[in-house]
Image (cartoon, coloured by chain):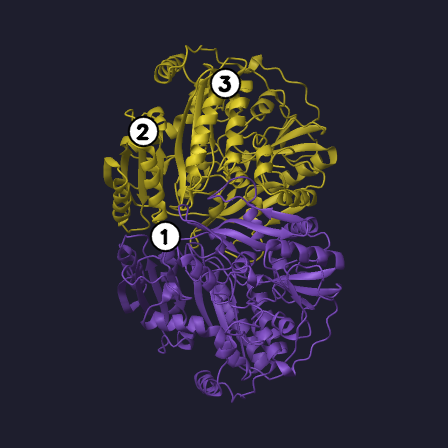
Chain colours: A yellow, B purple
Amino acid sequence: MSTDASGTGGDRRESFWAWGWEDRLPTDEERRELKNRIEGMLGFPERPLLDLPTLEEVTLAPPRVEPPDECPCETTSEKRDRVTHTYGSAYRDLVRGFHGRFDDAPDVVAYPERESDVAAVLEWAAREQVAVVPYGGGTSVVGGVECGGAGYSGVCSLDMGRMDAVPEVDEHSRAARIEAGATGPEIQAQLADYGLQLRHYPQSYEFSTFGGWVATRAGGHFATRYTHIDDFIESVRAVTPAGTLETRRLPASGAGPDPNRFLLGSEGAFGVVTEGWARVQPRPPYRAKATVRFDDYWDAVAACREVVQARLTPANCRLLDSNEAMLNEVAFDGSSVLLLGFESTDSLPPIEADLDRAVEIAEDHGGRVSEGPTTEDRTADGSTGESAADGDDQEGDSGEWRDAFVEAPYMFNSLVSMGVLVDTFETAVTWDQFPALHEAIRDNVTDAMEGACGQGFLSCRFTHAYEDGPAPYYTLLAPADVGRELEQWRQIKAAASDTLMEYGATITHHHAVGRVHRDHYHEEAPDAYLDALRSMKRTLDPEGIMNPGALL
Amino acid sequence: MSTDASGTGGDRRESFWAWGWEDRLPTDEERRELKNRIEGMLGFPERPLLDLPTLEEVTLAPPRVEPPDECPCETTSEKRDRVTHTYGSAYRDLVRGFHGRFDDAPDVVAYPERESDVAAVLEWAAREQVAVVPYGGGTSVVGGVECGGAGYSGVCSLDMGRMDAVPEVDEHSRAARIEAGATGPEIQAQLADYGLQLRHYPQSYEFSTFGGWVATRAGGHFATRYTHIDDFIESVRAVTPAGTLETRRLPASGAGPDPNRFLLGSEGAFGVVTEGWARVQPRPPYRAKATVRFDDYWDAVAACREVVQARLTPANCRLLDSNEAMLNEVAFDGSSVLLLGFESTDSLPPIEADLDRAVEIAEDHGGRVSEGPTTEDRTADGSTGESAADGDDQEGDSGEWRDAFVEAPYMFNSLVSMGVLVDTFETAVTWDQFPALHEAIRDNVTDAMEGACGQGFLSCRFTHAYEDGPAPYYTLLAPADVGRELEQWRQIKAAASDTLMEYGATITHHHAVGRVHRDHYHEEAPDAYLDALRSMKRTLDPEGIMNPGALL
C-alpha cells in the first residue's frame, strides 16, 4: 500500500515541483483548455503556456554536511531526494519549483523506519548542529518544511513516510494506533480490515500524514463536530531531543493543561510526532443532502449561522459565495449556494429530520432548494469508502463541488505553468465580526491584486461553521508576470494577513503557522504565551535544532 | 445577586467548616434520620452524633504578613476570612474544619474588584515573597486552594468573588464575557436578560466560579458533547506575575498549540484567570427521557457503550450500578439503572427518535424500560431554568437521582459529624480497560476500607460517556474512628489512586490535580512534558509565588 514518499520508487513517482503524482501532470491539451476557461471566465489577459520544468535543469549547491555514518536508517544526499524535500505545496513553492529554484534544499534526507532511527538522527543532529525538519507528505502551504539552515551546519529533512503502519486497533474502544508517516489512503486501507475508518479528510488527504495532521492541527472536510484532528486524538507519542514522551490513552482527562494539545500544533518545533492513538468509527450507513441557492449572500450567511446555532450538526454546511460557485461550476447565475449534508450514526435513519429542519431554516432566509432533499442508504454497497472526500461523494451540485475540492491542488500545477497567481487563505472569526472582516478582505485583497497584477478574482466559501462563527476560506486568482510572481504574491498575501489581524480573526483555521504565518501568529498569540512556548522549546530542544524558524 | 464570598455579609453566610450555607447546616433531627439510614442500609456499627463546631473554638496562629497598605482593594487578616479561605470542600477539608484544625490558614485574604487589583496584589506578593492562592468558590476537592506557605513569608488568598459580572454579551455570536468570580447562579441570572444560558452544571454549580472552572477544567453534568468547560471557551484573560495575557475570541484556530488549552487546567500555577468569553445558548425547548433497568451490570455497560458509539449524544447517559442506585434511592432491587435523556436543539422535536434508538439498544442488551419514554415541551413555561441540574429537573427515577446529585455535598456535612468517612473519586479509561480497572478498584478500595475501617461501601456511576470510554465516578463510605479519619482516608485514597495509575486510567476526569493528586499526576503526565510546564512556570512566574504546591 505504501506510496514511496521519497518519490524514488514504487509504481508512481511524485513530481519534483508540482502537487501530486508525476503521471498526473497536466497535458498541453488540458492546460490549453484551462487557459481558455480562465481567460474567458475571469477576463484575464492572454496567458502564456510555459514549458514544464525538468529535474535535469535544476542545480543544487553541494550538501554542507555528510549523511551520518552511524544512522541505522537510510540517509541520502541524492539530488532528487533533496529537491523533493525542499518545499511544501503552496503556490510559492510550486512557483519556485517551476522555475527550478531550490536554493534551500536540505543537505541530507533521512528515512527512519522505526522510532529508534528518529532518536538516532536527532542525536547526530544535536551533536553536529544540524537543523532537523520533520517531513510528512510535504503538503504544507505555509513553509512548514522549508528551512535554509542559516546558523546551522546543515539541514536534515526527516521523512517519516516509511513509518506508515497501523500496528494496533482496539475495536472495543474504537481507537487505532497509527504511525506518523501513514497517509490518508494508507490509514484507510489498514483500517478497512476492521470495518473502521478515521474519517478525517483534509484536502491533502492523498499525501498528507497522520503525524503532519497532529503537528499542524489539520482540519478535515466535515463542516461541524468531527472537523479537527485535535478531537480525534487519544494519545500522542513524540521524540524530542530531551527524550521521548507519550501521553496516556484516555477518552478524557481533567489533569492539568492537556499534554495532547501541546503536541497538537507543535509543528516540529519541540520534537517529532512518531505515532498516536486516534478515535475511529464505522462508515455511517445513511446520508441525506440538499442544495439551497440564495440571491443574497447575507441571507445565506444568516441561514448558515442559524443552522449551526440550532445545534444541528451537518457533515456538510458549505456556503459558496457566487464567485466560488462559479469557479467550481456549481452555479453561474450569481447565486450563493449552501450545500447541506447529514450523516447518520449507526442504523438510525432520522437524519432526514435534521436535514428538513436545516432546509426549513434556509428557506426562511430566502433560500430555494435546487437539489434534494435526498437520502442515500449505503448499508448494502459494502464499500468502506475509499474516496478522499467520502462525506461528499454524491451527485449534482455538491458532487461538482466535491470533484473540484479534490482536483483543486492539481489545477494549481497548471495555473502556475500559465502565469496565473493562485492562492488560498482561511480563517475563523465570530459571527458578529464576519461582515466587517469579509468586506475588508474583499476591499483590501482586491486592491492588492489590482495593485500587484492589474486585476484579480476573489471567492469565498465556508469550510467549517461553528455556533460562534464561520471559518471562511478565500481563493484568489490574478494574472501574474512570469518571474515576478513571488513579489506580487507577497503584496497580496500581506494585505490578506494584515486584514485578518486587524479584524480580530485568526491567521489560520487549519493551514498552520510554519514560516509564512509566523510574524502574524506572533501578533495573534499573547506575548507572555509565546515566551512560555519558547521556554518549553529550550527545555525540550536545548540545541534549538527542531524545525528552526517554524512557529517560533 | 452577589453572594458574599467572604462569608461575612449578605443575607446568608457560608459555613466556616461545612459545604454551603450556614442556614443549611443539618438539624439534629436530620442527622439522626441519616444516621439510622446509614446504619440500616449499609450495616455500619452505631455511629456517634457529634456536636457541630463553632468558630469561637477555632484558634489561628497570628498572620505572618500584614495586609499590604498599597493595595487598592480590601485586604484583611480577620479570623473568619482566614478560616473560610483555608480549605476547599473535600471530605478531608470538612473533617479538619469539623475538628477546628485550620493550621494552614492564609495570612491575608484579598478581595480584588477589578483586574488592576489582581495585578497590584501579585506585584506586592512577588516583592514580599508571599504565596498567592487564587480562590473562586472554595469548592476544590483536591487541595487546590490549600497552601501552608512553607518557604514563603506568608500566604495570600486571592478571593475573586467580587469580580462576578457578565459585562458583555454577543447575542449574534452567542458568546458572553464572564468575570472569573461569577458563580453558576450569578452567570445564569445575568444571562437570563438575553434569553441565554451557559448550561454548564458541575455539582458545585451553586458556589464554584467561572475562573475556577477554567483553571480546573471543570466537567458539567451533561453526559456527552457539552460536558467540559474546555469546549465552551472562546478566549481567556489572565494576569501572571510576568504580565497580562489574553487570547483572541475565535470560534476555532489552527495556529500553534492552543493558548486557551494551556490556561485550561493551569490551576493558578502560572497566573490568575480574570475573565473569559464563553459560548452560550438558549434553553433547549424539548427534552425526552427514559430509565432502563438491567439485572446484569455488564449488560448495562455494553448498552451504554453502544449508545455513545452509535454517536447518539444524550444529555444524560448515567449508568448507576446497583449500589449507586440504592444509595440514591433510585432502585433497591439490585438493578443497575441507565438514565437516558436527550435535549432538542431549537424548535426541532425529533429527539424522540434518538431516545427511541438509545432505548432499543438498551433493550437489545437485556434492559427493561422502567420509566418513559416521555417528552417534555418547555416552550410554554417561560422558565430560563434556574436549577443547578437543569438537564435533569424531571420526575421519577431520574428526578430522584437529580435530587441526590444536588444534595450530595450537603449530606457530606452530616456524615462528617457522625464519623462516616465519605469520599468520591472519578476517572476516565478506554472501554477495553474498564472491566479490569473496575474489578481492581472494587477489590483494592474495598480491601483498603476493610483494612482501615473494618468495612466499607463502594458504588459507581458513569458521569460521562465517550465513544472510546466511560468516566466512572466512585463513591465510598466507611465507618471512621473519630480523630483518625484522615489517616484512614489516606490509606483508602492511596489504594484508589494507585489502582487508577496501574490500569492506565487518569487520576482525574474533572476534579483537577491540586495537591492531593499531584504525585499521581506526575506519574500520569510524561516527564518531558512536566519539565516543559515547569519551564513555562519559571517564565510566567519567576518568583514562584503562584499557588505553590498545586499541579507542579
- The foreground one among A215 and A419 is A419
**Res. B435 visible in picture:** no
Q: Which residue is mark 2?
A: A400
Secondary structure of the residue carrying tag 1 is loop
Mark 1 sits on what residue? B311
Front: mark 2 or 3:
3
In contact (CB < 8 Å): disc 2 and disc 3: no
Q: Chain letter of disc 3? A: A
Q: Is residue A161 above or below residue B362?
A: above
Quarter of the figure with residue B267? bottom right
Tell me if residue A82 comes above or below residue A121 in the rendering.
above
Q: Between B506 and B48, which is closer to the camera in this rendering?
A: B48
Q: Chain of mark 2?
A: A
Instruction: Tell me the distance, in whole angstroms, between the alpha carbons under discs 2 and 3.
Output: 33 Å
How far apart are labels 1 and 2 at the CA level? 29 Å
Element assignment for label 2? helix
Where residue B128 sits in the image (x, y, percent)?
A: 75, 59
Q: Are marks 1 and 3 on the same chain?
A: no
The residue that label 3 is drawn on is A451
